[in-house]
Amino acid sequence: MPNKLIRWTCLIAASLIPSLVAAQSAKPATNSAATWKTECAACHMAYPAGLLPQRSWQKMMSGLEKHFGADASLSPAVNAEITAYLVNNSAEKNTSRRSAKFLQSIAPAETPLRISDTAYFEKEHRKVAAETWKLPKVGSKANCNACHSDADAGEFSGKNTKIPQ
Ligand code: HEC
Ligand code: HEC
């Protein structure tokens, strides 16, 4: 390649890289994330959007008045904002290995409303004894942060996991 061409190629590549990096690490709009945290962590932790497919979030958000025995209904505007946030950050949109595992474990015809009902959840928790879920400090499979100290940050790895006594 002639020198001039090499220089141009490098210049073009250098100017493209920052925009590619920016596109990959694009964060959700702060307002929607804040609204989701406020509304969806009122009764339990804010379950990370990347652990369920978008159809699950859509189904859940269209039935909040009957949400696992609770009335979690919202105004139409807030509902729309949170639904968009959940869909935009759903398992399909999240590039992590963890999201891929949850997604792969759910049959296309299924629309689970519980993360704790998915096959991947069951597989990862197969060693947790039935009595453990009933411990006073646990109480429910849905109580992720009883054992995962960093669950609020979407972190579930072994080093941050401890079954309470
Ligand atoms: C009024 C209280 C309340 C509010 C507000 C609320 N939830 Fe819930 N949610 C519950 C209850 C109760 C359960 C069942 C918990 C259990 O089984 O221990 C639940 C369970 C869930 C589960 C299933 C957890 C699992 O994997 O087992 C998801 C997902 C969920 N909620 C998402 C949301 C989202 C998203 C919002 C915000 C739009 C929200 N919740 C707001 C009460 C609430
Ligand atoms: C009774 C304690 C307990 C509760 C409650 C619990 N987990 Fe776990 N979880 C564990 C244990 C133990 C492991 C295995 C840790 C290891 O691999 O060393 C695990 C593993 C995982 C893993 C796989 C490891 C990883 O890094 O991806 C995920 C994902 C996970 N849990 C998500 C959840 C979610 C989501 C909830 C709530 C809906 C939840 N867990 C509730 C104990 C718990």
Image: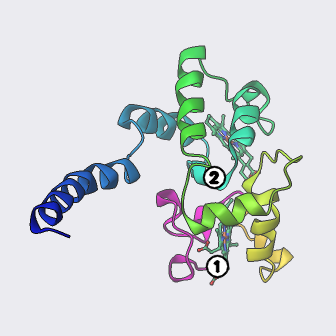
Q: Is residue 64 visible?
A: yes
Looking at the image, which is closer to me, 89 or 9?
Answer: 9
Colour scheme of the rendered structure: rainbow
Whether the residue carrying mark 1 lies under 8 Å from ligand 2 is answered with yes
Say which residue label 2 marks: 91
Callout 1: SS:
loop
Q: Tell me the residue at 27%/57% (across/down).
A: 17
In the picture as drawn, the residue positioned furthest to the front comes out as 2
Viewport quadrant of the C terminus: bottom right
Work out whether 110 lies above or below 31.
below
**Residue type at tag 1:** Ile
Answer yes or no: do the residues labelled 2 and 1 have beta carbons within 8 Å?
A: no
Q: Position of residue 155 (x, y in %)?
A: 51, 67
* Label 2 neighbour load within 10 Å: few <14, some 14-19, many 20+: many
Q: Tell me the residue at 63%/52% (across/down).
A: 91
Q: Tell me the residue at 59%/48% (across/down).
A: 49
Res 21 → quadrant? bottom left
**Residue type at tag 2:** Ala
In the image, 159: left or right of 140?
left
Predominant secondary structure, magenta span: loop
Q: Position of residue 103 (x, y in %)?
A: 72, 58
Q: Tell me the residue at 37%/53% (across/down).
A: 25
Work out whether 143 lies above or below 129.
above
Q: Which residues are magenta?
A: 141-165
**Who comes first in sequence, dot 2 or dot 1?**
2
